[in-house]
Image: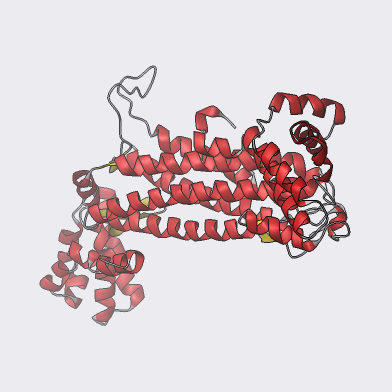
Amino acid sequence: MIPRYSRPEMVSVWSQDTKFRIWFEIEAHACDALAEIGVIPKEAAKTIWEKGGAAQFDVDKIDEIERVTKHDVIAFLTHLAEFVGPDSRFIHQGMTSSDVLDTCFNVQLVRATDILLADMDALLEALKRRAFEHKDTVTIGRSHGIHAEPTTFGVKLALAYAEFDRCRDRLRAAREEVATCGISGAVGTFANIDPRVEEHVAKALGLKPEPVSTQVIPRDRHAMYFATLGVVASSIERLATEIRHLQRTEVLEAEEYFSPGQKGSSAMPHKRNPVLTENLTGLARMVRSFAMPAMENVALWHERDISHSSVERYIGPDATVTLDFALARLTGVIDKLLVYPERMDRNLNQFKGLVHSQRVLLALTQAGVSREDAYRLVQRNAMKVWEYGADFLTELLGDAEVTAALSEAEIREKFDIGYHTKHVDTIFQRVFGTA
């Protein structure tokens, strides 16, 4: 985790202190279940909770033990025994390390996802507010980066809202995917631990029992989880890229907020660069990069190997911490985004009516002109605008073949901007449930 791109709440999910506390809770809940079914004394389970729950685990001490044992869970259990005393012999009865590690990892992913879902809610709120603010702010839509037909800036933001609303649904599904508990012992057969222990621990931690595991929880779950984070990151990059394009000097229809005292360039004092959205583009690349190793983790040897372990120690914290930061940064960008309707209007009219070419084309076909001829007539007048800066309406009115099919009033009517925005309310109703 890089502190520059980290926020404290998400970082704390992945801290060593948090991890060891979850490890203890898994072991203690398992002891409760073992006591309930008569495998260990109830007083022992009570002692484990009392003494272990009050313990202040020493991360450095655990690391010191691990340097000898070369095994992190054994190092933790050795340290825990120092607090619990003789009853520590009942801890980890019939369990294997993966029962602790995998269940803990899933608890952390669930907690991380709850933070990400809250981030998503904040982003959606900002997008909705700005979408309604600019619902009727007409701007040019572009395809291939070239002027196409009019839309509104609110529709652009409504599109982003709908996309991130889908991302939220995917995150919730991803949370469900990894919210499983595996307490099934060596090779997953429950030979030395009763399945009721797994059920108890799962319920206590807000998880569900893994239906069938090997010695590890199946990693297809995690592959789907990190792939989902990659999709969310891609949506972040899509919106960030849109803003970056709109901030280009030649366009300048929207711009990141430039705070007092901010500097854009060490060499050029005039610069106001889209640094936040460029940063988001880079962060999205990193989050997506974690999806592939998660997929490669699915194929483990037989009932268990640890080739996935080192991968997950990286990607669990890094993917969620980075995405948390990115979502919060994007929310800030949208919240303070500077929007320039006058510039949008100027750009819209830069090519003197060309954006209405399709309406003229359709009108000619409806007037009886073949599509091929209609396209030829409209295009030859449009090219004069591109090449000589002519006025599209003037050229059409001066074209005898066009006026033979359409009256002047019919041609002029095709240049109504309002025609292109007449269904904006319908779009907003579909996205937000209200217009």
Q: Residue at x 78, y 55 (%)?
A: 34
Q: Residue at x 15, y 59 (%)?
A: 394
The quadrant in which residue 91 appears is: top right
Q: How many marks?
A: 0
Classify 206 as above or below 264: below
Residue 199 falls left or right of residue 410: right
Residue nearest the viewer, comparing 251 with 90? 90
The quadrant in which residue 13 appears is: top right
- The spot of residue 296 in percent (x, y) is 74, 50
Residue 395 falls left or right of residue 95: left
**Residue 179 in sight from this viewpoint:** no
Q: Residue furthest top?
A: 267
Q: Residue furthest left?
A: 409
- The spot of residue 286 in percent (x, y) is 58, 40
Which quarter of the image is occupied by the N terminus? top right
Residue nearest the viewer, comparing 147 with 310? 310
Q: Residue furthest bottom?
A: 368
**Residue 75 in sight from this viewpoint:** yes
Color style of the picture? secondary structure
Residue nearest the viewer, comparing 119 with 280? 119
Classify 145 as above or below 435: above
Which quarter of the image is occupied by the C terminus? bottom left
Q: Residue at x 30, y 28 (%)?
A: 259
Q: Residue at x 18, y 70 (%)?
A: 400
- The spot of residue 260 in percent (x, y) is 27, 24
The quadrant in which residue 47 appears is: top right
- The spot of residue 389 in percent (x, y) is 22, 49
Residue nearest the viewer, comparing 118 with 31? 31
Residue 134 falls left or right of residue 114: left
